[in-house]
Image: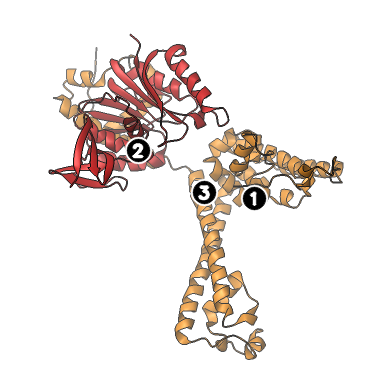
Chain colours: A red, B orange
Amino acid sequence: MPKVNKLYEGIYEVVKDKKQLATRNIDYGKVVYGEKLITFEGIEYRIWDPRRSKLGAMILKKFNIPIKEDFKILYLGAASGTTVSHVSDIVSDGAVYAVEFAPRSMRDLIGLASRRKNIYPILADARKPDSYAHLVESVDLIFQDVAQPNQVEIATRNAARFLKRTGYLLLSIKARSIDTVVNPIKIFTNELRKLEQTLEPKFEILCVKDLMPYHEDHLGVLAKLKS
Amino acid sequence: MEYELFSKDSQELACHSLALRENIPNLLPAKFDLKAAALECRFVASPSEYYSLLHEVTIKTAELQVSGALTPDQRVIQAVEALDDINENINSLSERLSEWYGIYFPESGLGGEALAIFVAYYGSPKNIGPENPLYPKTINSMGAKLETADELLLKGFAESVYSLYERKKQIEYYIEDRMRYISPNLKLIAGSILGARLISIAGSLEKLAAFPSSTIQVLGASKALFKHLRGRAPSPKHGIIYSHHLLNTAPWWVRGKIARALAGKLSIAARLDYYSGEIDPSLVEKLETKVRQIKASNPQPPQRMHVNETKNKKKGGSKCLK
């Protein structure tokens, strides 16, 4: 018999043989990427693999993720929608604006969005927030997983445009896409300095941890606008 | 503010949304709020109507973009990747066929496509008539007796292998044909298949044209390159371009130099193809002259400085690795 503990709003821990991260499935009976479904007391949970999702890893690394079911979220680097599907579960009463640049991934994302009312797929370059500014409203949270050398700059540019004063920024920084040779720790310090001091708007960092053992050379960052 | 309302047709709205992307800063103020504006103008009656319409429109827009995203070079990329898959399968299946048929007719001396055609046509070696040059070999064959069940199996298998060879030719012809339009200069210098492979590794002709020639030189050798960048290996001299005849027939001590010259010309060719489309036949001549020069000025392998050092035992530098 499985047991379910609530970790955050919309995010659960299903205990069945072992502890597994999960979200409540809003698309009943449907599986997105081959994940397991577990039903408990009439509610269906989708198991969330932290090795396939930076956000999932951040939650298990005890980031205090400020997310509520009516949140509007801007998701940069949505890819095929593996993580997006879980975010869409969490903000069942909100919206996920999912920006992705690759047409190939967008094909899968469109399929997902057509089954989930709260996903708004946008095929655009996250480096150019102007190009989708007419579609996206002010958001409570920006999540970014884009693996670009200037990803912090991309994040702040989007934050300047779309983030509410009280909103949060959640980043997954991939050292290997910024520089393949330099020690990741050096890269991370440098990127965090950019976020706090160099770029506009400036951020206050709330939590920062690497994503080991789920993702190598990745840094998770939770930040909010400096008041 | 004056305004005019569009119809609520999602297809039409998607087209407007796409048109807006190009010149948005000119049209909308910085903190423009579409939802508030739509409600204010009574375009939509409620936020929930706004969201469901937006959902429809974003999906429609993305669909339009995805279906419009297929460029001619993407078609060739799929073809050349299919070709690689087919080659891989042909190799292992042909090997299986020659191993399998070898039990019954080891003297055939055939292999590859010829064997596939032979088995698909005749089946058992017993079916060969005296007019066939292989006939004498069947008489004293040490091969085992081929039973009907096995013969049927083998024949069908050989037919499949043969059809793969046919498919391979068809794809090669397609690539040949398309490369003439997409990338004529690259085709002149690299040949259709190598040219298509370069585009495939780069991701598109646009990206290939943007690469510096040093990157083109080591495309396909990323593993060796990153090993080198982390300081644990010598730099790779060539990647996929090693399959070019000027390079793989050259003596090892000039391959690095030729690879550099070839990559330079390939990068010029890719840029010509992407940006102008004009054919420049002088590129090939220039490259050949350059290669002759390189070979003439390096007729001998370089002298090894310290013969005793273990380092110098290595011959020919790093090989290209995928």
The residue that appears at 16% across and 21% down in the rendered structure is B42
Residue ID for mark 2? A50
User: For the residues carrying marks 2 and 3, which lies nearer the camera in this image?
Assistant: 2
Quarter of the rendering occupied by the N terminus of chain B: top left
Q: Is residue A87 above or below residue B175?
A: above
Q: Is residue B246 above or below residue B158?
A: above
> What secondary structure is marked by label 3?
helix
* Residues marked 1 and 3, same chain: yes
User: Residue B76, which numbered label?
Assistant: 3
Q: How many marks?
A: 3
Q: Position of residue A179 (x, y in %)?
A: 54, 28
In the foreground, A87 or B156: A87
Chain under disc 3: B
Q: Position of residue B214 (x, y in %)?
A: 66, 35
Cβ atoms at labels 2 and 3 below 8 Å apart: no
Disc 1 marks a residue whose amino acid type is Gly
The residue that appears at 56% across and 89% down in the rendered structure is B126
Residue ID for mark 1? B191
Disc 3 marks a residue whose amino acid type is Val
Q: Could you tell whether B298 is left or right of A29 in the image?
A: right
Disc 2 marks a residue whose amino acid type is Pro
Q: Residue furthest front?
A: A17
